[in-house]
Amino acid sequence: MHIFINSYILLLVMTMNEDVVFIKNGEEKSKTIKPGKLYRLMIKTQKLEAIIAELDPHAVSKIFQHDGEEIHLVLEGEMEYTVGEKTYKLAEGDFLWHKSMLVHHARNIGTKKVVYITVATPPSFMTSMV
């Protein structure tokens, strides 16, 4: 899998039976809107899912704990991401990986919206948002 990021465009090229998925800027598979939060599902396969998340200033995600692992890449803004007992301060370009079985959540600590990508395996994030 190759991930290309340019001006907040997420393009996932996946080698799975020679299938390719291309998502243009402004498009998504589905969208979940909660007060102060927007989660855009970009791709979901049997093995992973990729989400572009946006949190308004001072917004906090729900607390998650599930099987698998995930990565987060901040595209814009600043945030805190708590995994287990430790909290990490992330800014544009920062990257965080963790086991999803550890309790985790995100919080926008800035005065502007934070935008970040989460890629998780196995796919379970969006189903827990229902």
Image (spheres, rainbow, N blue to C red):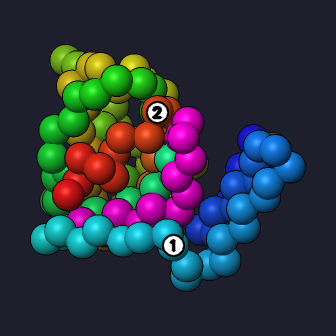
Q: Position of residue 9 (x, y in %)?
A: 64, 69
Residue found 52% across the figure and 52% down from its top: 44
> Residue 80: where, in percent of width, then height?
29, 41
Residue shown at 28% from the left, 63% from the top: 55
Q: Quadrant of the C terminus?
A: bottom left
Query: Please, which residue is most extreme toward the front here?
Result: 17
| Residue 42 on the magenta segment | yes
The prevailing secondary structure element of the residues shown in magenta is strand
Percent across and percent down for residue 89 are 34, 38
User: In the picture shown, does residue 77 fall above or below 94?
Assistant: below
Q: Quadrant of residue 113?
A: bottom left
Query: Is 106 on the left or on the right of 5, as rendered?
Result: left
The residue labelled by disc 2 is 122
Residue 83 is at least partly visible in this image: no
Density class for disc 2 (Cα within 10 Å; few <14, some 14-19, many ≥20) is some
Whichever of labels 2 and 1 marks the residue nearer the N terminus, that label is 1
- Using the image as rendered, state which of residue 106 and residue 32 is in the foreground: 32
Magenta stretch? 37-48
- Label 1 amino acid? Glu
Q: Which mark is residue 28?
A: 1
Residue at the extreme right of the image, as rendered = 18
Residue 19 marker: none
| Residue 90 in view (yes/no) | yes
Quarter in which the N terminus is drawn = top right
- Type of the residue with mark 2: Pro
Disc 2 is placed on an element classified as loop
Residue 10: image quadrant is: bottom right
